Amino acid sequence: MAAAAAQGPCLNHISRETSDIKRLSKFYMEVFGFEQVESPKFEFEVIWLKLGSSMLLHLIERDPTVMLPEGPWSSVAAVADPKNLPRGHHICFYVPEFDSFVQRVKDKGIPVHEKSQPDGKTKQAFFFDPDGESFLMQNNSSGPILP
């Protein structure tokens, strides 16, 4: 029993609500290499994606009656510029082939803000997905976390 308690909680999946589920799934498959996996049938559309052996992403059709915020693309503020992401909320991934990954994102016409940590070893790239979710990619899996 002590071993189970020592493990604690672990991430099961990340879910994203979107008004264009097919566009967003295409983005995650083309940019990150996610694969579509079988998902249950709900009264709304879902697409479940998997990356590697343990990362699950559930894309969920936006409920038009709830009107949750769409993200920075619906804003006229500076938040829509990836230069402002180092101090904003974002999801961070380590990318072993950093330079080729960043070039692939740029080749898709996605604006990218690149910078390095003060140590000069940790390269970072900030960008948005089509719905405005913010991402940080970095080349160092154990490098500094704070900008």
Image: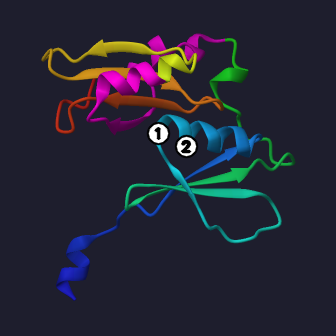
Label ID, residue 32: 1
Amino acid on which the number 1 mark rests in the picture:
Phe
- Residue 137 at x, y percent in the picture: 36, 30
Near-viewer residue (31 or 59): 31
Please tell me whether mark 1 sits on a helix, a strand or a loop.
helix
Label ID, residue 29: 2
Give left or right: position of 144 versus 52: left
Residue at x 38% of width, y 27% of height: 101
Query: In the rendered structure, which segment of residues is drawn in magenta?
Result: 77-104
Q: Decide: is 137 above or below 51.
A: above
Q: Quadrant of residue 76?
A: top right
Q: Decide: is 115 above or below 74.
A: above
Q: In which quadrant of the rendered image does the C terminus lie? A: top left
Q: Quadrant of residue 145?
A: top left
Residue at x 75% of width, y 70% of height: 41
Amino acid on which the number 2 mark rests in the picture:
Met
Q: Decide: is 96 above or below 86.
A: below
Residue furthest right in the image = 65
